[in-house]
Amino acid sequence: MIFNSIGFFIFFAVVLAVLYVLPAKFRWIWVLAGSIFFYAFARPGYVLVPLLITVLTYYTGIAIEQATSEKGKQKIFVAGVCFIIAILVFFKYANFFTSTFTDLFNLISGKQVSNSLLISLAAPLGISYITFQAIGYLIEIKREDEKAERHFGHFATYLLLFTKVIAGPVERAHRFLPQLKMPARLTYDNFVIGGQQMLWGLFKKIVVADRLAIYVGAVYNNYTHHSGSTLFFATVCYVFQIYADFSGYTDMALGFSKMMGYDLMQNFNRPLLGRSVTEFWRRWHISLSTWFADYFFNPIAVAKRDWGNWAVIYASFVTFTVLGFWHGANWTFIAFGFLQGLILAIEILTRKQRKNMRKKIPVWLNDGGGILFTVAYFGLSSIFFRANSVGEALTIIKKILHFNGPFFFESASLLMFMLAGIFYIVAHDVKKEFFDKRFSLAQNKYWVIRNGYYCLLIIIILVTGVFDGGEFIYFQF
């Protein structure tokens, strides 16, 4: 089940209806049962993997807390984390490593040996997100910043909650577990606020992202037959597609959770309006970015602090290369991460010069130039994110740089809907970023205007939505 399917809405309606009539102390049981059913719906056997990680993390956390020496805590912690990572590597990266090793062996030996270790199993949905939450939880216990959860049902609900189990947010235990200790806030306001956020996310997914996906797929899947101008426009569309798709999923996840009385952390803060790539990553996929900052970047930077600025640069390269590899077992994702690390290193090295330059340039020009550069750079690196191979990505970039040939679009109506969707996303974010206190339709104080806006949003979704657009992009990670 995916969030934009009729099946999921029926499932969620049943979960919500029963949740509202259950006594408070039993609600977590119903939510956990629904989460297990949701996960098992696609591949029933695969639910054993997240359950195994849940049981392992639960008992490892308690064992770390009960260990009487630092050495004992460290051994238990390392063993638990290694086992969790081993599960992730087996399902997600085993074929990548064995294929890379086989290709390297063939290159060195001059032979042509096939990879006999390929695994035909697909990775369980959302395994990366479950793994990150589990590892972050164990790190917090190891640091003694958090107590091990003793209620297994609450812990399992935290790790497996169906609204976030597939593609995040990467929720922190200290934020979510306390919400299970108190009765879920099943209020009218939560229902309305959650429903509004869900509607906005659904709009971004099926009206904007899935409409753009039609054009982007048609061009990128046949990139050899298209001109540089067409590939350039498709790349711009892809930037907005992935933003609308992923932030749309997050809005729906937060909205559904809010309707059940749970607050998840915000995952997007208008990233395409970031004035630098550094700022972009503070606004994009915030739960994952902060996870890497807390558990990966900061420890590396502190360990190499004697290097000065080079410690931060080194930590950036390592962190974003790993972050790129997290997205998928393909060299294209590693290249994507490397490009992010590269530009962040440049921004660190030129920080003083850019600060002096900003003093000589009008604020609007400086901000506008920074935003355009950030979007352009993200668009360039997203070519590697979208392409099937590094060679394919380089060919697309080469064709874009030539920027010649006829411009392709399937129909005037598709082009119109695409441009309208992009314009509305940009206008919405610009309004929130620069004019948030000004007139608002969505949060208008007048009932008629506010509800009229959401009625119009529903009509637009029903009339122009792409209802066969498929799953969210980040479900594959």
Image: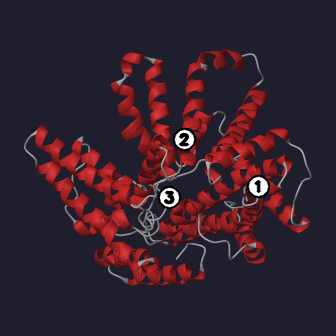
Three-letter amino acid code at disc 1?
Answer: Tyr
Query: Tag on residue 477?
Result: 3
User: Is 252 in front, or is 139?
Assistant: 139
Callout 1: SS: helix
Task: Estimate how packed mark 2 is, as few (under 14), some (14 to 19) or many (20 or more) residues with alpha carbons within 10 Å.
Answer: many
Circle 1 sits on which residue? 223
- Contact between marks 3 and 1 (CB within 8 A): the answer is no
Tell me the residue at 54%/41% (across/down). Answer: 337
In primary-sequence order, the first of circles 1 and 2 is: 1
Give left or right: position of 188 versus 183: right
Callout 2: SS: helix
Q: Gap between marks 1 and 2, in whole Å?
A: 23 Å
User: Is 313 in front, or is 177?
Assistant: 313
Q: Where is residue 360 in the image (x, y as percent from the top left)?
A: 75, 16
Give left or right: position of 229 versus 205: right
Q: Gap between marks 3 and 1, in whole Å?
A: 24 Å
Task: Estimate how packed mark 1 is, as few (under 14), some (14 to 19) or many (20 or more) residues with alpha carbons within 10 Å.
Answer: many
Q: Where is residue 191 in the image (x, y as percent from the top left)?
A: 53, 71
Query: From this viewpoint, which residue is outermost toward the left?
Result: 68
Q: Where is residue 262 in the image (x, y as percent from the top left)?
A: 43, 64
In primary-sequence order, the first of circles 2 and 3 is: 2
In primary-sequence order, the first of circles 3 and 1 is: 1
- Contact between marks 1 and 2 (CB within 8 A): the answer is no
